[in-house]
Amino acid sequence: MNELQALDAFASLSQETRLRIVRLLVMAGPDGMPAGAVGDAMGASSSKISFHLSHLERAGLIQSRRESRSIIYSAVYPALSGLIEFLMKDCCQGRCDPAVGTCSAVCEA
Amino acid sequence: MNELQALDAFASLSQETRLRIVRLLVMAGPDGMPAGAVGDAMGASSSKISFHLSHLERAGLIQSRRESRSIIYSAVYPALSGLIEFLMKDCCQGRCDPAVGTCSAVCEA
DNA sequence: TCCTCATTTCAACATCTATTGAGATATTGA
DNA sequence: TCAATATCTCAATAGATGTTGAAATGAGGA
């Protein structure tokens, strides 16, 4: 995960429909669900859903596979968890020692 | 952390200067650093930095305190780590059992 | 009080982003 | 091959966002 990837990922997650799509796919699990079902769940037009699914896939947060007529989308879990890892990298310049309580909650997590 | 807070937070992190500011403050540790020092590190004008610092503070990702003439900004670590928690909530509809390997890496983390 | 330093506010402008509806593409079964 | 289903692409429009420079605020020291 580099800065550009992180920026793309955060931009993707900063849009209401896309954030909901990601949460839906996270809940759906590794099997994912077809684009149409995502659209139904969101109550959005096909072009709108397609736009946002493409956006999320370009950012690497979700992936797709074709299964007969449908295209199945699913969450890319490591990409999601990698975001916080990127944010927290080099936390406190390494001076952080959880045992001594020199740093905040996140360093301890 | 609700949906609106998450959207604000992700929008804040989707901008290059702001993402760098957050990473800088994460590295700086709980003591934080003055707005001017952040500006110097970014090589950006004071109004630009002030705009982005306000944006981040509104989103709850950083906090500020006055210390004599300077305003010291620091990262709000729980807000950052809370983001992924929000994303991963209800992962796999609870069907996920890490012990049996029915889910992906993130559920196991 | 006056001056300086540190930071914020404001308005104008340019740029980026999301939505819409129509049409194109790809897959399957009759 | 034809028709139906599922999804994607495209161009136009409207709205949101970032940058700039100048001016305003607020705190501390002479």
Image: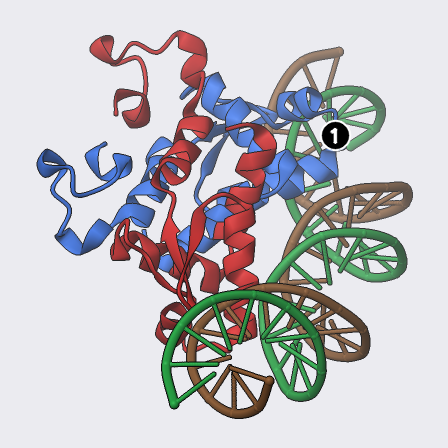
Chain colours: A blue, B red, C brown, D green
Q: Residue at x 26, y 55 (%)?
A: B27
Q: Name the one closer to the observer, B3 or A20.
A: B3
Q: Residue at x 27, y 57 (%)?
A: B28
A63 is higher (above) or lower (below) than A72:
below
A87 is higher (above) or lower (below) than A105:
below
For the C terminus of chain A, give its image quadrant: top left
Q: Which residue in the protein does label 1 denote?
A: A44
Q: Residue at x 26, y 39 (%)?
A: A104
**Residue type at numbered disc 1:** Ala
For numbered disc 1, what is the local secondary structure? loop
Where does residue B38 sit, x and y in percent of width and height? Answer: 38, 68
Where does residue A56 sit, x and y in percent of width and height? Answer: 53, 42
Q: Chain for mark 1? A: A
A19 is higher (above) or lower (below) than C14:
above
Q: Name the one closer to the observer, A46 or B81.
A: B81
Classify residue D14 as left or right of residue B60. Answer: right
A97 is higher (above) or lower (below) than A42:
below
